[in-house]
Amino acid sequence: MTPPVPPPPTSWYAVYTAPRAEKKVKERLDQQAIDNYLPLQISIRRWSDRKKKVELPLIRGYIFVCVTPRQQLQVDNTPGVVAFLKEGGRPAPIPDRQIDALRVMNEGADVEVSMEEIPAGTYVRVTCGKLAGLEGELVEHKGKHKVLIRIDHLGCALADVPSSCVEPYHSPTSL
């Protein structure tokens, strides 16, 4: 009897979508049972006659998918998908720990995404509050202490954190 063949490995990738199509692409990927993550944030929109809470993509124009190399073609052929974010002509994988950290951060705090070059900070672990257990860099940004998570090829996500709620932590080999 031959041993079972292990499933091919999956990796997270960022997929660029058509303008304002992130939620529709998520629906279509869900229908195809493709593992995906669309970080959303609640925003208050004001019109002349009313205010309304709306969910907007945290990173406009992108959705994350966790797929095998074979599933990449299926994602590429999904209506609303423009292309995978690539490096050297190939889809650029994003480490699982970065997606996990983004999920924790987005669920526990107001998150700001930045494409600017922010100098490296001290590697820390958050010890209290909704972000407890999150690991990232403590930086000063716009006059406030923030915990920063770098997301390969997409910039970084930042959230306010009191400096009393962090402790220095041994940095992993690659951030």
Image (spheres, rainbow, N blue to C red):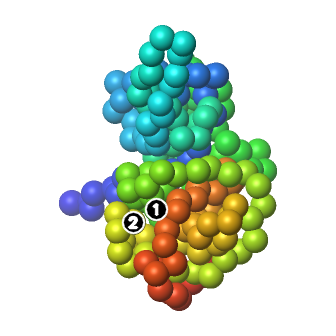
In the rendered view of the protein, which quadrant contains the N terminus? bottom left
Number of residue marks: 2
Residue at 47 percent across and 30 percent down: it is: 44
Mark 1: few/some/many CA within 10 Å (<14, 14-19, 20+): many
Q: Residue 88's x, y, as percent? A: 78, 50
Q: Are marks 2 and 1 in contact (CB under 8 Å)?
A: no
In the rendered view of the protein, which quadrant contains the C terminus? bottom right
Q: Nearer the viewer, mark 2 or mark 1?
A: 2
Give the residue type at disc 1. Ala
Give the residue type at disc 2. Leu
Q: Nearer the viewer, residue 56 or 21?
A: 56
Residue at 39 percent across and 66 percent down: it is: 131
Q: Residue 20's x, y, as percent? A: 58, 22
The residue where tag 1 is placed is: 101
- Dot 2 or dot 1: first in sequence order is 1
> Please, is residue 15 above or below residue 118 in the view?
above
> Please, is residue 134 above or below residue 32 in the view?
below
Gap between marks 2 and 1 measured at Cα: 10 Å
* Label 2 residue SS: loop
Query: What is the quadrant of residue 77 in the picture?
Result: top right
Query: What is the quadrant of residue 84 in the picture?
Result: top right
Mark 2: few/some/many CA within 10 Å (<14, 14-19, 20+): many
The residue where tag 2 is placed is: 131
